[in-house]
Amino acid sequence: MDPLYGTLLFFAATIASVVIRAPHANRSKTIKVVRQARPPIDVAVLVAMGVAVLVLPLLYALTPVLAFADHALPAWAFWTGAVVVVLWLWTFHRSHADLGTNWSVTLEVREGHRLVTHGIYARVRHPMYTSLFLNAFAQLLLLANWIAGPAMLVVFTVMFATRLQREERLMHDTFGPEYATYAERTKRLIPGIW
Ligand code: SAH
């Protein structure tokens, strides 16, 4: 299959994800932050994520610099990628809608921060991270290049590994037994599995 189809679908989905996030990001900005953890590792990983999810895909799509790592795009990869895109955007939308103004890019607690346990958060504790893993798999399947394709999966795995424990500790410290009970009845990323 022409690799251009995969590239176009990936960029269309990326634009859709920006549109989904924009109103939530704007609303959250207006609420005061009362606790924040932003160590250099988090900033470095966020910059790396920007490179992985945007800079490398753009270099692949618009310049020949990554052409040495191009490969063919099998039809199965495109169609599986298309299904993953739907799951990615749906979980991305649901997690933003349910988390509301409690959302933040780095680890933060905001004024009036509420523990969200309803909607998609009733199924898993980190649905937004589930959606970002789906984003990473969509990129791997849709970009026919051995560097731009797996980049987000590699970087997001590092981000997830360096953040999960700290985020759960912050939630435990902020919400105490309420979070403990919530954590007992929910999985992290995949309903019923983990
Ligand atoms: N890990 C979650 C949220 C990502 S946004 C997910 O993947 O869906 C990160 C911020 O969300 C953190 O700073 C934390 O303050 C907040 N947060 C995480 N889980 C939350 C919950 N259940 N209720 C309210 N805020 C939460």
Image (tube, grey):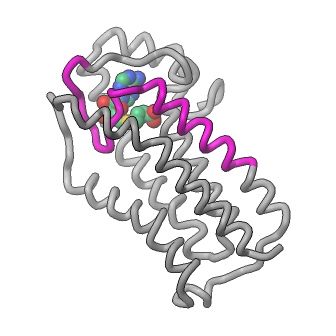
* Majority SS type along the magenta span: helix
User: Could you say which is closer to the camera, residue 141 or residue 178?
Assistant: 141
Task: Establish if 153 lies above or below 89.
Answer: below
One can see residue 18 in this view: yes
In the image, what residue occupies the spot 43% across and 10% down?
181
The quarter in which the C terminus is drawn is top right
Classify the position of ligand 1 by quadrant: top left, top right, bottom left or bottom right: top left
| Relative image position of residue 136 (x, y in whole percent) | 57, 55
Q: Is residue 89 magenta?
A: yes
The quarter of the rendered structure image containing the N terminus is bottom right
Residue 42 screen position, x and y as percent: 28, 52
**Residue drawn 54% across the image and 35% down it:** 93
The image quadrant that residue 77 belongs to is bottom right
Please provide the residue range marked out in magenta. 83-112
- Tell me residue 66's x, y (percent): 55, 85
Q: Position of residue 79 (x, y in %)?
A: 80, 56
Q: Is residue 43 above or below residue 122?
A: below
Q: Quadrant of residue 158?
A: bottom left
Question: Residue at position x 28%, y 15% from top?
Answer: 175
Is 109 inside the magenta-drawn segment?
Answer: yes
* Observer able to see residue 168: no
- For the point 47% across and 24% down, which residue is it? 98
Q: Is residue 42 left or right of residue 150?
A: left
The total of numbered circles placed on residues is 0
* Image quadrant where residue 143 sits: bottom right
- Which residue is nearer to you in this view: 1 or 48? 1
